Image (tube, rainbow, N blue to C red):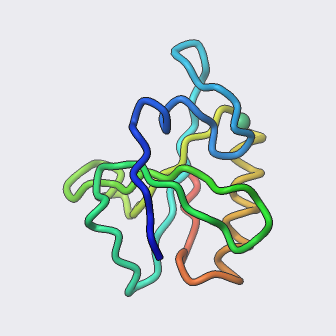
Amino acid sequence: MEYYIIPDKEALSQCAACQGNINEMTEVFGLGAKLKPGVDLSEFESHCIQIDLVSDESPVYMMITAQGSEAKNDGNDCMFLVCSESCSQKLTKVLEKEISLGKMFETVLRPE
Ligand SMILES: [Zn+2]
């Protein structure tokens, strides 16, 4: 599968669930996920990529966490940015579907 790196500026200004705009005024929520063993996205480390979902949802932007980063140490292989608690819940549902159908994700890690 081919992935494209999305410029940070663009990826970090869009909610992964509703595609709404995120700016300095928006409270941002992070949602982490763990990739399945064998899914190697290390070449995209610390970059944002667009991924297609196996469900009919629109593609989402995902950030690949860097080795040694706090997020990575907490067990997140990748992070999604969302603009609200409800978007976080919506994206969690989408990702749970991906986990059952897809080959990419192992678990969704909800922030405490
Ligand atoms: Zn949103």
- x%, y% of residue 92? 69, 58
**How many badges with numbers are in the image?**
0
Tell me which residue sits at (40%, 85%) in the image: 37
Tell me which residue sits at (51%, 15%) in the image: 24
Which quadrant holds residue 98?
bottom right
Which quadrant holds residue 65?
bottom left
Q: Which residue, as the protein is rendered here, is positioned at the far left? A: 68
Tell me which residue sits at (77%, 51%) in the image: 90
- Vertical side of 64 occupied by 18: above or below: above
- Vertical side of 82 occupied by 98: above or below: below
- x%, y% of residue 108? 58, 65
Which quadrant holds residue 54?
bottom right
Tell me which residue sits at (76%, 62%) in the image: 93
Residue 111 visible in this rendered orientation of the protein: no
Q: Nearer the viewer, residue 6 or 64?
A: 6
Q: Nearer the viewer, residue 17 or 9?
A: 9
Q: Is residue 44 left or right of residue 25?
A: left
Ligand 1 occupies quarter: top right
- x%, y% of residue 57? 76, 60
Q: Which residue, as the protein is rendered here, is positioned at the far top? A: 25
Residue 11 visible in this rendered orientation of the protein: yes
Q: Nearer the viewer, residue 43 or 38?
A: 43
- Vertical side of 20 occupied by 106: above or below: below
